[in-house]
Image: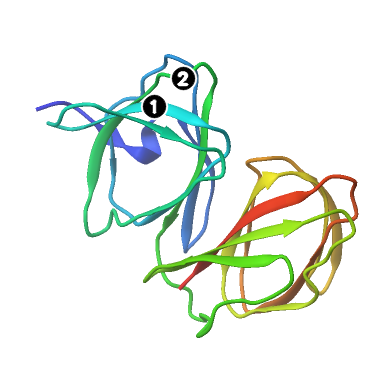
């Protein structure tokens, strides 16, 4: 049988942070590089930070090529359908995705989806809701009652102000990821000169 490692031990799946509810990693595969065969067994959120042209080969299956556009959001039910595969970057640029395993449901979850200016619900899955946040310069979400814990993954960065009892102005780049424990009220404001885009994952 072909040897394989856990996704946590695959060298091109770089650890970012872990808490009780999420394991977050940065997939960075150079052009022409090939990962080890590795296993996934937790439901996972993926956000493509740039366009991806790759070849994936599930263990025991034929290889499959695919083109994944920048900004693509995927939720994979690996807890019920585990996967062992190998990935080859057949594009000309680095393949980059942020992956977040859904380890557990937080004690407080939201009954209804979040609604706020600049926030769009993308998908509602059994263990996660996903949203797109888009703020032009000067725009704000206003105060949002985030009755959940979740992760913010930056797609198009710049300066962003986050107010959640304290106000922080940060410079964020594509691929940056921030976890928040809920429930809390928070507000995102774009004080910069370029659009800000991010994906918000709500753990359920």
Q: Is residue 181 visible?
A: yes
Quarter assignment of residue 191: bottom right
Where the N terminus falls, by quadrant?
Answer: top left
Q: Can you give x and y, in whole percent of width and height, for residue 73 in the image?
A: 49, 50
How busy is the neighbourhood of tag 1: few (under 14 within 10 Å), some, or many (20 plus)?
Answer: many
Q: From the viewer's side, name the closer residue of 43 and 92.
A: 92
Per the image, label 2 sits on a secondary structure element best described as loop
Where the C terminus falls, by quadrant?
Answer: bottom left
| Residue that badge 2 annotates | 91
Please say if 91 is above or below 170: above
The residue depicted at 61 percent of the width and 70 percent of the height is 181
The residue depicted at 57 percent of the width and 70 percent of the height is 149
Quarter assignment of residue 141: bottom right
Q: CA distance from mark 1 to mark 2?
A: 7 Å
Per the image, label 1 sits on a secondary structure element best described as strand
Q: Are marks 1 and 2 in contact (CB under 8 Å)?
A: yes
Q: From the viewer's side, name the closer residue of 3 and 126.
A: 126
Specify the label residue 54 is tagged with: 1
Q: Is residue 127 left or right of residue 141?
A: left
Sequence order check: which comes first, mark 1 or mark 2? Answer: 1
Q: Residue furthest left?
A: 1
Q: Is residue 12 visible?
A: no
Q: From the viewer's side, name the closer residue of 30 and 10.
A: 30
The residue depicted at 70 percent of the width and 51 percent of the height is 197
Please say if 203 is above or below 67: below
Specify the label residue 80 is tagged with: none
Quarter assignment of residue 88: top left
Q: Can you give x and y, in whole percent of width and height, for residue 105 in the image?
A: 43, 72
How busy is the neighbourhood of tag 2: few (under 14 within 10 Å), some, or many (20 plus)?
Answer: some
The residue depicted at 26 percent of the width and 34 percent of the height is 85
């Amino acid at each position: 049988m072909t040897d394989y490692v856990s996704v946590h031990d695959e060298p091109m799946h770089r650890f970012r942070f872990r808490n009780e509810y999420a394991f977050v990693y940065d997939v960075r595969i150079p052009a022409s590089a090939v990962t080890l065969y590795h296993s996934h067994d937790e439901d996972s959120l993926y956000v493509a930070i740039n366009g991806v042209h790759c070849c994936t080969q599930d263990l025991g299956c034929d290889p499959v090529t695919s083109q994944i556009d920048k900004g693509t959001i995927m939720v994979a039910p690996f807890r019920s359908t585990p996967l062992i595969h190998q990935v080859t970057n057949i594009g000309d640029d680095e393949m980059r995705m942020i992956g977040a395993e859904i380890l557990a449901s937080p004690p407080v979850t939201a009954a209804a989806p979040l609604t706020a200016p600049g926030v769009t619900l993308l998908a509602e899955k059994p263990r996660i809701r996903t949203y797109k946040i888009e703020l032009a310069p000067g725009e704000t979400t206003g105060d949002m009652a985030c009755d959940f814990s979740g992760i913010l993954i930056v797609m198009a960065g710049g300066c962003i102000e986050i107010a959640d009892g304290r106000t922080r102005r940060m410079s964020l780049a594509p691929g940056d990821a921030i976890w928040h424990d809920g429930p809390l009220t928070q507000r995102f404001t774009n004080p910069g000169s370029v659009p800000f885009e991010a994906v918000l994952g709500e753990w359920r």
